[in-house]
Amino acid sequence: MTIRLGGIIVGLGLTAVLVLWSLVPGLVNFAIPEKPDYYAFQEENIAPEGGFSFEGAAGTWDYAQLQRGYQVYKEVCSSCHSLKFVAFRNLQELGYSEEEVRAEAASWSLPGVDQKDGSVIDRPGLPTDYFPAPYANDVEARAFNNNAVPPDLSLMTKARKDGTHYVYSLMLGYGEPDPADQALSPEFETPEGLYFNEHFYNINIAMPPQLNEGVVTYANGPEATAEQMSADIAAFLTWTAEPSLVHRKQIGWFVILFLIFASGLAYLSYKQIWAGVKPKKE
Amino acid sequence: MASTAEGVRRRDWIHIAALSTAGVGGASVLYPLVSQMAPTADTLAASTTDVDISTIEPGQSVKATFQDQPLFVKRLTPEEIAEAVADDTADMRDPQTLAERLGEGNADILVNLGVCTHLGCVPLGAGEGEDKGEYDGYFCPCHGSHYDVAGRIRKGPAPTNLAVPDFEFASESVIRVG
Amino acid sequence: MSFAWAKQYEPQTAFTKWMDEKLPLPRLVYSAVGAGYPVPRNLNYMWNFGVLAGFFLVLQIVTGVVLAMHYASNTEVAFGQVEHIMRNVNYGWMMRYAHANGASFFFIVIYLHIFRGFYYSSYKAPREMIWLLGVVIFLLMMATAFMGYVLPWGQMSFWGAKVITGLFGAIPVVGEPLQVWLVGGFAPGNSALNRFFSLHFLLPFVIAGVVILHIWALHIPGSSNPTGVEVKKESDTIPFHPYYTAKDGFGLGVILILFTFMLFFLPNMLGHPDNYVEANPLSTPALIVPEWYFYPFYAILRAFTGDLTIPFTDIILVPAKLLGVIAMFASILVWFFLPWLDKSPVRSGHYRPMFKKFFWFGLIPCMAALFYLGGAKPEEPFIVLSQIATAYYFLHFLVILPIVSQIEIPKPLPFSITEAVLGKDEGGAGAATAATDMSAGDAPDASPQPAE
């Protein structure tokens, strides 16, 4: 009885505090409509026509596309963005041979140690090396990029909601504010040195538009349109973020089919065991 | 339900099948659990080592790392080669000729794993001024194993010669071990 | 252990006889989860989740030990080590996704287990101790899960750690020194990460220990059942093995299908993208939320937005932050008092018409709302909704439950479990029979009617 009485008192007290000091003042605020003072960014991402090859439960990598995406990363993105969790040896998974990977690694220059005097020198990369960072540190990165640090791209497609499409949308999202939306938030402007991109959460992004038509030339394959390059880099960055993606789904099919089979047997076994315990029917 | 012989057999079959399937499932879970302890991809990728031999003078050794273990690369002098060849026919625990240890097309580059075959200490003798043991090669201070110029066990507890890893000449000046 | 008719272990071979003399472990297992444990014959699928929770505890310990073999608890390298596990360790991605999603499934089955207890009043005498130990397990699970989420040292790890340890700063007088002591610094850093790793490794074994006590306590009165009528005679029960081992085996198969579907096809769905960004103490993510299983409690925490002041003055008696912290802890502590808050002599919700209405149309929507609101942005209308849901939460347990249990008129109970299962032909007669019919019409899941 004491506990129940105490419970009722505590419960009513706590609720009274909540209602009188939090809910009621909150309702007063609620009654005043908030004025949207931000230019709203486009949360819905766009997708390339036909989607990506690795989407869906049975998706697989399009190795030609991943190789094109790597070319885009190497020739465009890598001048500002690192890829620190990916090693050159991983490129073998994109269909390059061991020798090609060795040659590719050697085409990158990494900081090394002079064996004679210990000073820092440039050396060619080895397959075991990870992709080098373009800047020595964040301070240098800021100094070169209008006070913004270009983020590492290894995990970008997992570090954003709907990441693959986000990268694709961001690459193609540059433009001008919609006049109608601009009218709703007249204070909105794009400051000097930033660029309007409706798919960036802050709308104004420090990165200038990159994938302009023809910025890379694909040796053999489709024309390097902005859409094509954006799709290719989005696919490549999906692979860098989750190299096990396709393998994972393949194992998944096998495991789930096995479990469905096993559960079916377990169900039959369970029913057999319980057969004698079921209620008698007239 | 009538407990005919047919019914009993069917019942048993289902339980056996269900339990065996569960057993197969459990056993397959062991595979990733066991294999996760095997060397990781980055460890395996680092399992070849390139050594620049152009700067090694005759009689000089360099120490490198191969699969996280010390590697001795030595350019033998003509005198050392003569000594080793002379010993090819000597009584040894693990008989091997110098030619066998150098491999084809290799006149003077001796590549040994710097791991005593007794209990895994690093033998002395590769560094300048170190004790080379009684046979002018390597000496393991842990339990007194003596290796000769060619890295062959001559005295002490070690059972076999110093291991010679697989290697090839990637170019005139570089050997690739592994 | 509990019933006179429980079968006793009889070793058959020379080895098992020898073993039984020296260390009667097989006897213990036989009586605990074997043929020697008589269980009510009418348990429905809601009684599967105890065994399933045990399975997920084992899964978490096994995958966790594996991950600990490759992890390093240093802020400089922790994030990279997790990526090392994902990329380089053989099947490391599988281990990590199994551990991350395993935590979610552990909480899913535990919540179902707890809500089974709410509906069937499993906390009532003589099972108070089982319930109390269960709440202790839940609290330990929350602490373990929270510390585990910090280990990858992503943005959510860091800011989650900062916000949750910041709660302790709300405690008057000792709050701030306590907060600094907890993380071993002025913000979470290496000291915090190391102690969280150490405790995250330790606590699951403590949980396993309390689980053993939980099961021990269960074996004193025996399992409850959907009618809430106590076991009266041998025909009310069947041996745990093979009947419930077979049923739990099937249940395990079903939950594993769901679990592996998440693991292999949607491994990051229950996580947060921001945790794939390395922790940055200088930049806060746009929205800090805990893992989904903390959402109800996080919603309660955030519901208190106003300081408790003396009306028409500026004197603050209790700041809003402290009110939220008190309410959040109270929301779980209140579970400890349930056996004494609910005084209805009837256990099962099937036979409690008024309680049942408050359960399905009060508590369940309220919890669903709290689960949603805990992950919502802190803006209207979510704040007001979470305040309403929080108010109902406390009213339900502290006010409605004591009063309802006092005034409601329960429906007549079946005479026995056997009667509830087998119907009037084998059961008693008269009034009790009518009750059975009512209950059968009301709740078709009261008896495990195996389909043909």
Image (spheres, rainbow, N blue to C red):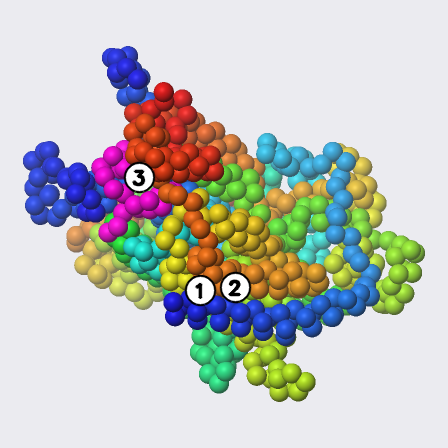
Question: Mark 2 — residue?
Answer: C394
Relative to the observer, which residue lies in front, A128 or B139?
A: A128
Q: Quadrant of the N terminus of chain A?
A: bottom left
Q: Residue furthest front?
A: C430
Q: What's the amino acid at mark 1?
A: Val
Q: Quadrant of residue B94?
A: top left
Where in the figure is residue B155, as x and y percent of width and height? 17, 52
Q: Earlier in the sequence, mark 3 or mark 1?
A: 1
Q: In the figure, is residue A123 to the left or right of C399?
A: right
Relative to the observer, which residue lies in front, C231 or B84?
A: C231
Q: In front: mark 2 or mark 3? A: 3
Q: Secondary structure at mark 3?
A: loop
Where in the figure is residue C204, as x and y percent of width and height? 36, 57
For the residues labelled 1 and 2, the Cα–Cα distance comes to: 8 Å
* Magenta stretch, residue numbers: C220-245
Q: In the figure, is residue A223 to the left or right of A150?
A: right
Q: Is residue C195 above or below residue C316?
A: above
Question: Mark 1 — residue?
Answer: C334
